[in-house]
Image (cartoon, rainbow, N blue to C red):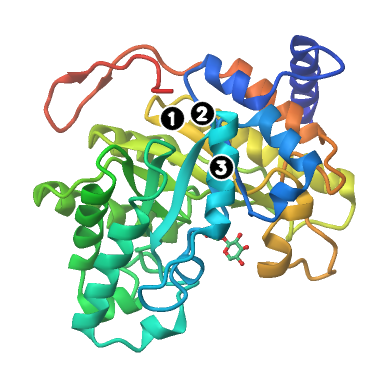
Amino acid sequence: MRRRHLLLAMAGMALAMGGAERPTGLQALAAKRGLVWGSALSHTALADAGLAALLLENVGTITPENALKWEATEPEPDRFDFRPVDRILAFAQQNGLSVRGHTLVWHHQLPPWLEELPAKELEKAMERHVRTVAALGRGLIRSWDVVNEPIAEHGAGLRRSLWLVRLGPAFISHALCWARLAAPGAQLIINEYGLEGDDPITARKRSTLLALIDRLRRDQIPLDGIGLQAHLLAPGSGSPQFTTLASFLQELHWRGLKVQITELDVSDRELPADIAVRDARVAETYDRFLEVVLREPCVEQITTWGLSDRDSWLNSTFPRSDGLPQRPLPYDEHLRAKPLRSIIAARLIQTTPPMEPIPSRRHGSVLPIGHHQG
Ligand code: XIL
């Protein structure tokens, strides 16, 4: 209860600081602390003037939600279709936004032809795909999710995707090297979900990922950062905790990696129907999560998976058992700001990143930490 009062007070303060009528955009608040704020969007959503205006008010970077996935970009072998993504790139260019490239090598949303290829052909197809798609939007696409979700669901080892089964673990190194050739100026990212919590599966996923990173580092494979998808779940009971997250982020930092929060949203599927209860618990989860990540200097950008509840993927992929639409994002289905939006703003204003250097365990020296890169 005390925490809830605090949240409301913080929300009020954010409104006061941003002016009562038009609160300061999230990107403007993020930029003040050297961070970039972003949102995913579909190319069709751009036709909605209301949503486009909200995006321009709040974000500095956008992620095509589906338009860069393999089934969209290369529906048939060597026939590329960049029309949907071109609309998003044009919107970004016209409005001075950067773009996150999502995603080059994943096990979902693949065209059927790919799944039938023998290993040698599959490897060639991957090279052609990565080299062609990663060359898009030079200058605009500042980071690429080169490999998405490579860790096994329960955390032990790599995921037995078609890539791993047919090409072996080297598929990750190959994808990163080809991406570097095609997009020499872009940050290369491995993006993964389920890295945020305090449960044993998360702990296993983290160690598998750290071992993968160490192997890539040893082999001098290019890798600039890790994406934490952060599809979070508001807990049905108890308070949201992210007790072990800060030390995991520091492990990444010690390895010289940047961290991007790439797909943030909070599902309310374990909560009762009451909207006030759901909104409060979702907001509390965001607040606690942001409080932790905003303190870590390696975190340089935060993207939510959409801006408005209307566009959330959760209702089709993880629906509530009562069928009610979920409320996982800062704007409601009518594109009106929810209290959550003010809570996010207040967190951006309030949480200061540490200014003192963080000791590097690896080199026994001290890494200089300034403000984040914009
Ligand atoms: C989701 C999209 O939001 C949906 O529209 C699509 O039907 C399925 O994929 N992790 C990812 C994203 O990396 O690409 C997924 O996006 C959500 C989970």
The residue lying toward the viewer, choosing from 362 and 213, is: 213
Element marked by disc 1: strand
Q: Which residue is mark 3?
A: 90
Amino acid carrying mark 1 in the image: Glu
Residue type highlighted by circle 2: Val
Decide which of tag 2 and tag 3 comes sooner along the chain. Answer: 2
**Numbered mark located on residue 96 in the image:** none
Q: Is residue 332 left or right of residue 104?
A: right
Instruction: Say what amino acid the circle numbered 3 marks.
Output: Ala
Q: Residues within 10 Å of mark 1 (few under 14, many from 20)?
A: many
Q: Which residue is mark 2?
A: 36
Q: Is residue 230 above or below residue 32?
A: below
Q: Quadrant of the N terminus?
A: top right
Tag 3's secondary structure?
A: helix
The reply to whether callout 1 and callout 2 are in contact (CB within 8 Å) is yes
Q: Which residue is mark 1?
A: 300
In the image, residue 344 sits, relative to residue 333, either above or below, namely above
Q: CA distance from mark 1 to mark 2?
A: 7 Å
